[in-house]
Amino acid sequence: MKKFIFIWFALTLVFGWQIVFSKDKNQVTGGDIVTLGKLMFFDSELSANKKQSCSACHAPETGFTGPDAAINGGGAVYEGALPNHFGNRKPPASAYAGESPVLHYDESAGGWFGGMFWDGRATGWTLGDPLAEQAQGPFLNPLEQTIANGQILCVKVKNSSYARLFENVWGPGSLDCAKNSNGVYERIGRSIAAYERSQEVNPFTSKFDLFWDNAKAKGKDVTKIKCGTGSGGMGGTMGCGSGGSDPNRWSAFRNLGLTDAELQGLAVFNDPNRANCSSCHSLKPGSKGYPLFTDFGYDNLGLPKNPDNPFYSMPYNWNPDGIEWIDGGLGGFLKSAGYPPDIYEPEMGKFKVPTLRNVDLRPSEGFVKAYGHNGYFKSLEEIVFFYHWRAMMGRGMGGGMADMFPPPEVEQNRTPLNMFPRPQVDNIVLFLKTLSDGYFVR
């Protein structure tokens, strides 16, 4: 069945791309598409109440995710343009997302990859570009910017101060709302995606990036960094010692820009015999030569429900299950798209692996960020400790202790987590804090 689905996807993509790229009016002809996309990204007029823009949920000062500490500290789900209209998940980061491929099933890896949103529903099957499809989504979503249809959105853009720029970019007549509002809707998505792929949104200016450059200049491969031998704070094979002769031990990367604690955190993060976070949050370089810290895949980490999620209280027509609602993630999307149980059941409870870039970026020291698809965790320390604790409990090392966390929202299809020592939780957190942009000017 999966082989059949894979072939069907391939045919869909081939014919979909033929449709997209056969549109003569859909080719960029001149002007600055990045500037155009940015103007639309920050334009609050493009909403039902003229008060909500894309940046209301994806702000630069927080790494293009939720900018309200009070919301992040509670339900973590942002209100739409209309009062008391809430979606069901926290805003994912819209930065460092442009290389996510079209949603597909990889037979060799045995999993789904690509698409956008936490559940992959911006598949890229229509436009050949998941990021452009994601950019389109919130405008017409009745729980977000709540514009009634593409034609009304088109008119709003036509009445904007950047309408002339739109036609400079897409060509004369490209803002014809009466005859081709669907084409305009597509161009809006592609323009915003161009901004979201720009250097402004993806600058690669973190402390880690400077370390990466320094290591590369010295002929060292950061993707191979791991723990050495000897005691690493806990002793034995579970520590992260600095000894030995392995050229990839963390101590061999000293004096390149990271502290010893940050290097140990990176080593534990990357070491297959420790936390092995990089098996999903990959250190493989992207097209710009730097890691994106995601493999664009899907996993179920066994996160608990967030009881403060306002979606539980949404009216019946939006949430007929009320407090009993279960977020199926990728599996839920595949089920709603009409796939059979043998396709969607193995994906229930799985969510897209987010980039870790700017995971700690915040406008002030005390600013609260939310973590996980539902924002259950309120600090890096909490979620990294969760990984450590659940891995320990999964190995039967709890010694009869009660679990410190509520049960998973979805028990099935849980991804096994690697065990790593408690002292390294703090070091992993220190490493993650090196991923915030703005450390240096490129």
Image: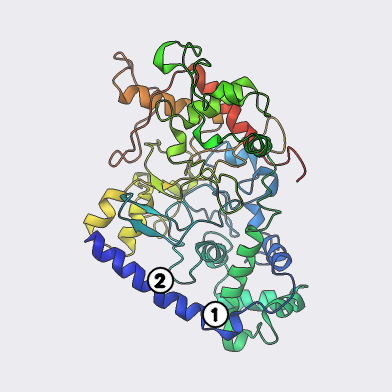
**Residue ID for mark 1:** 182
Residue for point 48% across, 48% down: 89
Q: Is residue 341 visible?
A: yes
Give the secondary structure at mark 1. helix
Bin the neighbour count of mark 2 within 10 Å (Cα to Cα): few under 14, some 14-19, many 20 and up: some
Q: Is residue 381 visible?
A: no
Q: Amino acid at mark 1?
A: Asn
Q: Nearer the viewer, residue 305 or 339?
A: 339
In this rendering, is residue 374 above or below 262? below
Residue 108 picture location, percent across and down: 31, 52
Left or right, residue 111 beside residue 386: left
Q: Nearer the viewer, residue 267 or 302?
A: 267
Residue for point 29% across, 68% down: 7
**Residue ID for mark 2:** 13
Q: Quadrant of the N terminus?
A: bottom left
Left or right, residue 27 beside residue 13: right
Q: Return the mark for residue 138.
A: none
Residue 159 picture location, percent across and down: 73, 77
Q: How is the image coloured?
A: rainbow
Q: Nearer the viewer, mark 1 or mark 2?
A: 2
In this rendering, is residue 387 above or below 79? above
In this rendering, is residue 319 above or below 145? above
Give the secondary structure at mark 2. helix
Residue 180 picture location, percent across and down: 57, 85
CB under 8 Å between discs 1 and 2:
no
Q: Quadrant of residue 414?
A: top left
